[in-house]
Image (spheres, rainbow, N blue to C red):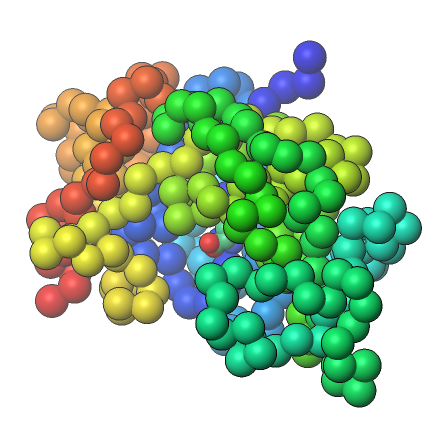
Amino acid sequence: MPGYRGRFAPTPSGPLHFGSLVTALASFLDARHAKGSWLVRIEDIDPPRCPSGADSEILRQLEAFGLHWDEDVCYQSTRYEAYRAALEQLIDHGLAYPCSCSRKDWQEYAVYPGWCRSGVRHPERAFAWRLRSDLGERPIVWQDRLFARQCFDPAGLGDVVLKRRDGLWAYQLAVVVDDGDQHINQIVRGTDLLDNTPWQCQLQRALNLPQPRYLHLPLIATDDGQKLSKQNLAPALPINDKSVRRLLHEALITLDQAPPPFLSDAPVAEQLSAAIAAWDSNRLQPRTYRALPYSIKMNK
Ligand code: GLU
């Protein structure tokens, strides 16, 4: 039985905010409580979305919060050859096809209707590569550690893009190939990715990779119900020690871990070692988490 291997896989489109802290912390604590390894992977496959320096800022933030990782940080921008080999394997098995349709062509449909499955419609255009979601394993069923039994038919979600028309690799393929190569067997991440999991499971089957266990975490909302995100300008996590201590305590409360109040201002290492020992994923509740006063105040 291989040991626990988990990871945190931020897209360096900007610095981490309180929502990403909660995700990173949960995956870190889950791994460390299980005496497992915890890796960091920078998902920088979309350079136009990744300002330079955002990756090192993220790593500095993780370090300030005491979230020290094992092994070398993996950068997806160094992994194109592995993605190419995986795509080739899918093509060989008839599970990926070139698609020349633009978003505009199928704007009246909720998901891409699969027109290019039987041959590219516009051979003169650049093409993307899509997954034959109708031919992979269906339905996809997994027992989410928080959201219980999940059952999806990936064909209803559409033929997801594996490589974009502009030549960039797409998240779905990259994440599966990297989780596979890094032997990740436990994934703790935000529930915004819950409905991406069926494609990822299909890809794991197609590429002969084991399926990790999944724990999807609720998103964090402010009191007015807005999701905390880079898009709505959630503030960057501070790295000064005083703020870090308070935010770490708030993140533990958010995760229903009931950290003892006397630790609220304690040094990071002390808070973390108590939290690792006390970590209980069964305390997590499948509801929207509320941002707490301090993390909201950072907004103002
Ligand atoms: N890179 C993704 C993000 O920042 C997370 C990927 C994952 O955890 O699977 O939203």
Q: Nearer the viewer, residue 100 or 56?
A: 100
The residue drawn where x is 50% and y is 18% is 34
> The N terminus lies in which quarter of the figure?
top right
* Rendering quarter of residue 182: top right
* Rendering quarter of residue 84: bottom right
Q: Above or below — where is 71 with respect to 75? A: above
The residue drawn where x is 10% and y is 52% is 223
User: Would residue 23 be found to the left or right of residue 196 on screen?
Assistant: left
User: Would residue 39 be found to the left or right of residue 23 on screen?
Assistant: right
> The C terminus lies in which quarter of the figure?
bottom left
User: Would residue 143 be found to the left or right of residue 240 on screen?
Assistant: right
Q: Above or below — where is 192 with respect to 27? A: below
Residue 64 can be seen in this image: no
The residue drawn where x is 47% and y is 45% is 195
Residue 50: where, in percent of width, then height?
Answer: 52, 71
The residue drawn where x is 77% and y is 67% is 98
User: Would residue 219 be found to the left or right of residue 35 on screen?
Assistant: left
Residue 26: where, in percent of width, then height?
Answer: 38, 34
